[in-house]
Image (cartoon, helix red, strand yellow):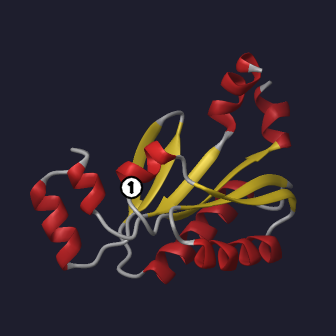
Amino acid sequence: MVARAREMIPRVNLVVTLDTLEYLYRGGRIGRAARLMGSALQFKPVLSIENGVVDALERPRTQAKAVRRILEIRVTRVGERPVHAAVVHADAPDKAERLRQEVASLFNCRELYVTDLTPVMGTHAGPGVLGVAWWSEEELVKIG
């Protein structure tokens, strides 16, 4: 099981949006100036996590725009391929359910779950995180 889990790591995509930059600041992930600027402009950053590396993709100013961008990124990366997906959230079950419904209507999901972020991720990202994780069986064929 451990070998299979390690094999899946490079195949899983996770794109999320944060509700606040406060927890990244508290955890030492960003500086005070970035936190103040992001808070003043009300950024809802869109982050991608692949192979354990966090990449800031965009900085929309509303969560609705951030969620729309997450779905657009997913379309770009997945296309029409069937996927296994999960909507992830931190203390935002109602928003997660709405996002699950959108994902189900827009994509060919072989399976689709809603799940809480892990406590470690939630601690660094804070409440209100919302995103989508996925992997495609076709990626397994290409890579494996």
Horizontally, residue 103 falls left or right of residue 28, namely right
Amino acid beneath label 1: Ala
Q: Position of residue 52 (x, y in %)?
A: 49, 34
Horizontally, residue 36 falls left or right of residue 103, namely left
Between 110 and 143, the one lying in front of the other is 110
Q: State the SS at label 1.
A: helix
Q: Residues within 10 Å of mark 1 (few under 14, many from 20)?
A: many
Q: Image height check: is 116 above or below 44?
A: above
Between 39 and 142, the one lying in front of the other is 39
Q: Position of residue 120 (x, y in %)?
A: 44, 43
Between 72 and 7, the one lying in front of the other is 7
Horizontally, residue 70 falls left or right of residue 41, namely right
Q: Residue at x 39, y 70 (%)?
A: 19
Q: Residue pushed farthest right?
A: 110
Q: Residue at x 10, y 60 (%)?
A: 33
Which quadrant of the structure image shows residue 79? Answer: bottom right
Horizontally, residue 95 falls left or right of residue 78, namely left
Which quadrant of the structure image shows residue 92? Answer: bottom right
Q: Position of residue 110 (x, y in %)?
A: 89, 56
> What quarter of the picture does the C terminus occupy?
top right
What residue sits right under mark 1 in the picture? 125
* Figure label count: 1
Q: Residue at x 51, y 60 (%)?
A: 16
Q: Position of residue 61 (x, y in %)?
A: 35, 80
Which quadrant of the structure image shows residue 95? Answer: bottom right
> What quarter of the picture does the N terminus occupy?
top right
